[in-house]
Image (cartoon, rainbow, N blue to C red):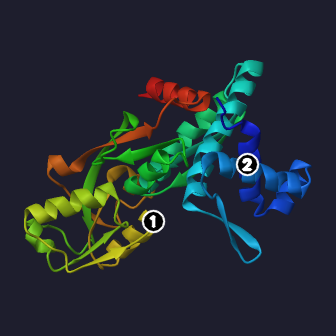
Amino acid sequence: MRTIDLESLLIFRTVVEEGGVVRAASKLHRVPSNVTTRIRQLEEYLAVQLFRREGRTLALTTEGHTLLNYAHRLLRLADEAVNEMQTGKPQGTFRLGSLESTAGSRLAPILSHYHEQHPDVIVELMTGTTAALIKRVTQFEIEAAFVSEPYTAPELESIPIFQEKLVLITSNKISRLHSPSDLGSSTMIAFAQGCSYRQCLENWLSHHNVIPQRVLEFASYQGMIACVAAGTGFAIVPVSVLSALQANDKVNQHALPKQVSSNKTHLVWRGQASSALTAFIKMLKTKK
């Protein structure tokens, strides 16, 4: 039975990375016609078109993007297999995703310790909302990610790692909130849709029939906290972030009901964990 060989996947990935056949051929020390033939044979075997030509450049089709995700994963696993057989130690690139809050307040000592234990592993860290990170894990763009509740991803493996306490923050001019309805005429400051913390806050406000006057979306906690401190509106943040950013005195913190304030951060991944991820999980469990 014929299968896709790793060499064909390597050629395909190189064409994508180099942006064309000629540059890929040069990098692979092949003639361009050979690279073109191997791509055509791959398309014929899969019965799909992997590239479409846009002017002088090649662009991936939807099917091409899907194959690229698998190519990254399969080639990484092949490299890991060789490296581990030869050295017995995790090596290679470990692509990890994280919430902004977790990256800013939790990960520095963890990644430092991991690097000390496994210096041959290169950790590539990228941040995003829970929804965005889960999508990237599902599509094998990253191997694992730290995400927060609530989320739904039955196809992913997961373990709880951190317990976070969430608080509502306002400017120091607002010393007390009598009820959620006090926020109805204010501006909610939050990450984009897909942020679990934002969803928690919106669910709580909706339960009390409160709709913020408007929403301002930010890409960092520094920007959110500065905007709240200036009196623009309110936001929900983990206490650990306020401490990490030394912002406890810049805003007022208001307690939230336990069902909103208590939140767990999980590490999620899909399928068989690589040796690098297995070592990372083991380290996290020993530190809990």
Disc 1 marks which amino acid? Ser
Q: Residue 235, position in %: x, y?
A: 29, 66
Task: Say which element carries label 1.
Answer: loop
Comparing 212 with 154, the one in front is 154
Residue type at the position of mark 2: Gln
From this view, report whether residue 116 is shown above or below residue 93.
above
Q: Quadrant of the C terminus?
A: top left
Question: In the depicted view, which residue is nearer to us: 282 or 231?
Answer: 282
Residue highlighted by disc 2: 41
Q: What distance separates the C-alpha of mark 1 from that of mark 2?
A: 46 Å
Q: Which residue is mark 1?
A: 220
Quarter of the figure with residue 225: bottom left
Residues 27 and 263: in front is 27
Q: Going 20% across and 80% down the picture, which residue do you hit? A: 213
Residue 4 in percent (x, y) is at 67, 38
The label number, if any, that marks residue 229 in the structure image: none
Name which of mark 1 and mark 2 comes first in the sequence: 2
